[in-house]
Image: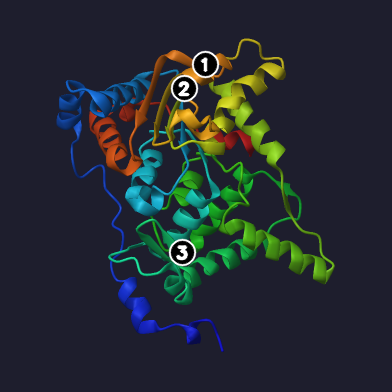
Amino acid sequence: MTTEALINDTRKAELLSTEVEHIDIKNFDARPIVEAMKKMSFTSRDLGRATDIYNQMLADPDCSIVLVVAGSTSAGGCMDLYADLVKHNMVDAIVATGATIVDMDFFEALGHKHYQALEIPDDDTLRSLYIDRIYDTYIDEVALQNVDHTVALIANELEPRPYSSRAFIREMGKWLTKNGKKENSLVKLAYENDVPIFCPAFTDSSAGFGLVKHQVDAMKAGRSYLTMDSIADFRELTDIKIKAGTTGLLMIGGGVPKNFVQDTVVCAEILGHEDVEVHKYAVQITVADVRDGACSSSTLQEAASWGKVSTALEQMVYAEATSVLPLLASDAYHRGHWKTRAKRAFGKMFD
């Protein structure tokens, strides 16, 4: 019997009945509430200062902005927010987890949806229905497997050689321009606007399954196959840092993407660019606690000791990102500094 035949379709349809609606930062003006929060204390004032710093990045004609995303905020309702940052020239490069780019954005670009969990039954029950859970959000596993196979399909059509994650994700964006089912896809918009996307742990995602299938099928058929080149990722992002000069980081979560983008300063120095600037501006929104010594939660002040980030214009915001990021992004959108920003189009560096 097929997977679908084993599933209780009535129960599955009941659980996957309420779609996550992604917030639209253009439809509300957060400036008044952010201004009010600046006059408060605790996280409110931190968010106010972080928003000021992000607006300074946008207003600085010399500053190139890197969006850094870890965690599941895209699945949780911020997917269109990130797309708008690209569409309106509010970020110039992206470093993210594979899940953010593939399992969430590319997933929806293929026409699939994320769903609110109105109830959370036993997770074994969810498994029997082929429903994957991210906290209080559901994904149809059968639909997610469509992502695996689509990635394999794209890989099969490419020249068998090493690719950086940026180069492969660009091919995914190109594929979506002809085959995608969602206009507001981050992967598609990044391709169209020459905004490079890097996933330093790219195969730690649905793409990994597709690429393994691509390689195994090629091996069985005696064909050559493509590989992912993580060193090229580091080199290419460092090349962007060297060319950009002044940079600002808008970081959601931490982990590998955060450390990866910060390390470009050190890498540039190792390559002989002793005059490379540390990241001038930095904002991080996270719930990670510094007390356990985890890399994900190392503060921006700590990064300064490594020669990665300036302490003059940095702000940690300890909050769950879906609750504060829409305020920051809406405030910046409505202040409009993006309207006069020069477009970097860093993606063209690698053509």
Q: Quadrant of residue 172?
A: bottom right
For the residues labelled 1 and 2, say whether their Cβ atoms are less than 8 Å apart. yes
Residue at mark 3: 110
Nearer to the camera, 130 or 178: 130
Quadrant location of the C terminus?
top right
In whole angstroms, how far apart are the C-alphas of marks 1 and 2? Answer: 6 Å
Which amino acid does the dot numbered 1 rest on?
A: Ala
Regarding residue 277, the answer to whether it shows in the image is no
Image vertical order of residue 19 relative to residue 247, above or below: below
Which residue in the protein does label 2 denote?
A: 300
Q: Which residue is mark 1?
A: 304
**Residue 236: percent from left, percent from top:** 64, 33
> Is 258 on the left or on the right of 334, as rendered?
right
Q: Secondary structure at mark 3?
A: loop
Give the residue type that dot 2 points to: Leu
Q: Quadrant of residue 317?
A: top left
Q: Is 179 displayed left or right of 348 in the figure?
A: left
Density class for disc 3 (Cα within 10 Å; few <14, some 14-19, many ≥20) is: some
